[in-house]
Amino acid sequence: MIETRLPAYPLITLDPLLSIWSTTDNLYDSVTSMWTGADKPMNGNVIVDGVAYRFMGVKGADDIIPQKKVTLSLSSTKYEFENSLITFSIKFTKPLLPKDLSLSACPIVFIDVECKSKDGKDHTILVLISFGEKIAYDEGKKITKSGAIPFSGGKVGYLGRALQRPLTTAGDYKEIDWGWLYLTGNSDIIATTVGKMRRYLKKLDISENNLNKKVILSKFTSKVTKTTGFSYFNIIAFDDISSINYFGVYKNGFWATEYYDILNALQELLKTRDSIIETVTEFDNKNELEIVERYGRDYYITLIAAYRQVFAGLKTVYDGDELLCFSKECASNGCMNTVDVTFPASPLLLLFSPRLLKGLLIPVFKFARMPSWPFDFAPHDIGRYPFATGQRYGIRNQLHNIGSVYLAPLRRHIYRLSRRTKLYSLKSQMPTEECGNMIILSTAYYNETGDESFIRLNADLLQKWVDYIINNGIYPDSQLCTDDFAGSLGKNVNLTIKSIIAIGAWGLLLNKLNSSTGDPYIDKARKLAMELEQQADAGQHTSLTLNERESWSLKYNLIWDRIFKLSLFSENLYKKECDFYFKKSVPFGIPLDSRDTYTKTDWMMWCACLVNDQYLLKHVSSSIVKMLNETKDRVPFTDWYDAVTGSNKGFCHRPTQGGLWMPEYKRHILTKKGYLEP
């Protein structure tokens, strides 16, 4: 595990609607909170020989046990404390293992506590960790119920709204508003209220709080001596009952197909907890050792900061015999399965499990075939999380404003409406961007899996989108793209690069589906690439647009020419671009383009992979870590920030940070024979 400062530390990271973080350097300096900023109170106190010390949250003892350090791995966050009497630690672990999707998707986190004597004397220890009712609902006070029932040699506590209404709200800055919180482990589990906690906390000053009356509590009593300490664990879980509205059908989490229900899952996890922790530790240690050796400590810190966040931005369900995956475009509009979010997230998904990438693509293909989608290009999204009910982005104003809540009947069933409804504003779409993304992502998925049936099933749409690019997207007029922060651009060079690579990628796929029929597409892509290099050449770099010769931008889309081994663009272009990017660096990275000083973590990292020399990769990694260490914005890992000041520009907790795995994905591609190779 590595000691480092992060703007926010991951604690309970389950899915887009329940992801709890600590946003201060010390665990006891603030209320633990959702990525949205909403309070999700977890409080911890340790009583040593009758004297209480607080180690987590703001409720409890006035005195704290000083925090000494916080260390992190891909899967765990560990806090260590000590005073003159004891040393104490608490570790939060979310198992995310490539070979066990059911476990990875299971909505649980392990909490491990250890305590030892510091002064060599005997001490009586009482540890109290509580979880407040606000974890189980959104916004204002709701009526809740709680309890503790016998379970596997101990008890399991539960807490949730008295009236359960699953899947009743959607939006961006939203928290879970339905479902049940569970707590078990080898400690006493108590369901109580803040007032009744006084009998356990005695001298601790816990005031009444109408917004957080009920809690479930882990209570553990033991002794430490000069030679012996103690350890124990809890498992925190959340069953959301129904996870996704998939075009009118409520879907349960994928984990339930393996574990049946949450109580059965907890029983299984209690039995296998030790082996799971051992496997997760081996996974983390192996990755730390190998990745630090290959790329350096700073690069690995960026992966640590992003790993749990990426998967906390996803939810998996089962549809027939097919795994489906759903993402939330957190802190940017709440859209679901946004294609230009899946695109940057893809390197980690391709490495972790290509099945997850396929699961993100299937709903997009499905919606693109529905009558309500009127265009010959790919959609931007499939709804607003957790409602996969039709693209939300670019809806015309008269539909956008129907009703005060998302569940207004017309907006709830967008996918059922006909083309004649004229749902969408064309100027708000990203036609070239999303067509290119879907073609490239489908090609990358095939290259990992050889899943020819998936490509054949969707070949008609892919062909239509390639045709759209050829006819409309080589040098498109002004239109939105994923980097439209400063407005849309005409003749966007980076967008043209994506179009050219998408054409070549389709050629590769066609050659696999129907021998040699893809060669004309590859030849066309090669010719277009040569033309673009000449037209965009601005001396030391390529321009941002063909209309502005002195402008420049990060040409991150070039990396897929490397990944697919198409060799459409010259080696000289790669070297020239990377040398220029290095010269444009400012304190916290390299600006995205010449229009402003903001940057994107994913796109910087992709550019750092364009050359085999690691000078740019190490520079980008250290710049991102510098931002993580120094930014004043205490939010989960942002992918969009000012490269001069390090300040967040508005995004956080987005799955896009999976793009930071591009160096590892590129290494994987270059050392493994893919299905696109002869």
Image: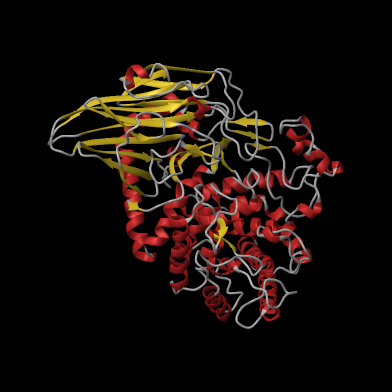
Count the labels in the image.
0
Expressed as whole percent of the image width and height from the top left, the position of residue 617 reads 46, 68
Question: In this picture, is 278 found above or below 638?
Answer: above
Q: How is the image coloured?
A: secondary structure
Looking at the picture, tell me which residue is in the foreground, 199 or 636.
199
Indicate left or right for 297 with 39 as reference.
left
Indicate left or right for 99 with 572 as reference.
left
Asked whether the viewer can see residue 672, the reply is: no
Asked whether the viewer can see residue 117, the reply is: yes
Indicate left or right for 219 with 474 as reference.
left
Q: Quadrant of residue 64?
A: top left
Return the residue found at the far right. Answer: 420
Q: Quadrant of residue 128?
A: top left
Question: In this picture, is 4 found above or below 27?
Answer: below
Expressed as whole percent of the image width and height from the top left, the position of residue 250 reads 62, 30
Indicate left or right for 507 with 196 as reference.
right
Residue pictured at 72% horizontal, 46% vertical:
393
Expressed as whole percent of the image width and height from the top left, the position of residue 374 reads 80, 48
Looking at the picture, tell me which residue is in the foreground, 207 or 582.
207
Return the residue found at the far bottom. Answer: 539
Question: In this picture, is 514 found above or below 92?
Answer: below
Q: Quadrant of residue 431?
A: bottom right
Residue pictured at 50% horizontal, 42% vertical:
312
Expressed as whole percent of the image width and height from the top left, the position of residue 285 reads 32, 52
